[in-house]
Image: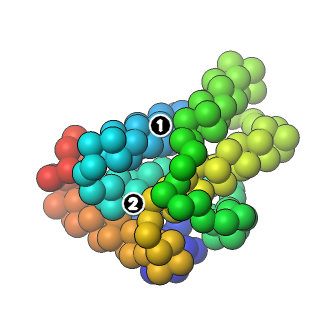
Amino acid sequence: MKIEEYQEATKVTAMYPRVKALEYVTLGLIGELAEIEEKIETDNEVFYELGDACWYISQLCNELNFSLEEVFNEIKEFPAGGEMSPFHEICLIANIVKKVCRDESDNISEDKKEKIRGYIIKALDFVVGQLEDPEESFSKVLQSNIDKLSSRKERGAIKGDGDNR
């Protein structure tokens, strides 16, 4: 699956309150990155969690009018095993979102958007770095994620909790 196709497809499965979109996708990304790290620590398969993190990254890009493909192309190199935790970056995103909620209502400055964009690149770098062959496997992660979410949406099971819905 091409990255730009994935970004468009994520919009179809986005089922969250529009008035709190930025907050929702930021909190969702925090949760998914935590699940990835938890599975790494317990030697469990992270493939599906990577897709879920990509979905939230894509939605964060959608909310801020970024191209996911451009963000992906800005990853400088794929780290072996994704050595660096993305929590510093995602916490900085959350801090900016908090300030936007407090100070700016729905208007987010270009400066803050660019800071968030830089942190998104680092978070995506971590996600992609978990793949043995990032160039080949990334599109498989995206396709699998959209297939899973599309199936859940068709069955009315997109809301809820757990992997086996």
How crowded is the residue under tag 2: few (<14 C-alpha within 10 Å), some, or many (20+)? Answer: many
- Res 104 visible: yes
Residue drawn at x 27%, y 49% as measured from the top left: 43
User: Which of the two residues, 52 or 159, is positioned nearer the viewer here?
Assistant: 52
Inspect the image, locate mark 1, and give the three-letter code of the amino acid beneath it.
Ile
Disc assigned to residue 30: 1
Q: Which residue is mark 2?
A: 51
Residue at horizontal 33 percent and vertical 55 percent from the top: 46
Question: The residue under label 2 is which amino acid type?
Answer: Gly
Q: Residue at x 59, y 60 (%)?
A: 79
Secondary structure under tag 2 reads: helix
Q: Residue at x 71, y 49 (%)?
A: 117
Q: In the displayed structure, does residue 155 sit left or right of residue 21? A: left
Viewer-side residue, 32 vs 111:
32
Q: Where 127 falls versus 147 (above or below)?
A: above
Image quadrant occupied by the N terminus: bottom left
**Residue 42 location (% of width, % of height):** 27, 43
Q: Looking at the rendering, which quadrant does residue 67 occupy?
A: bottom right
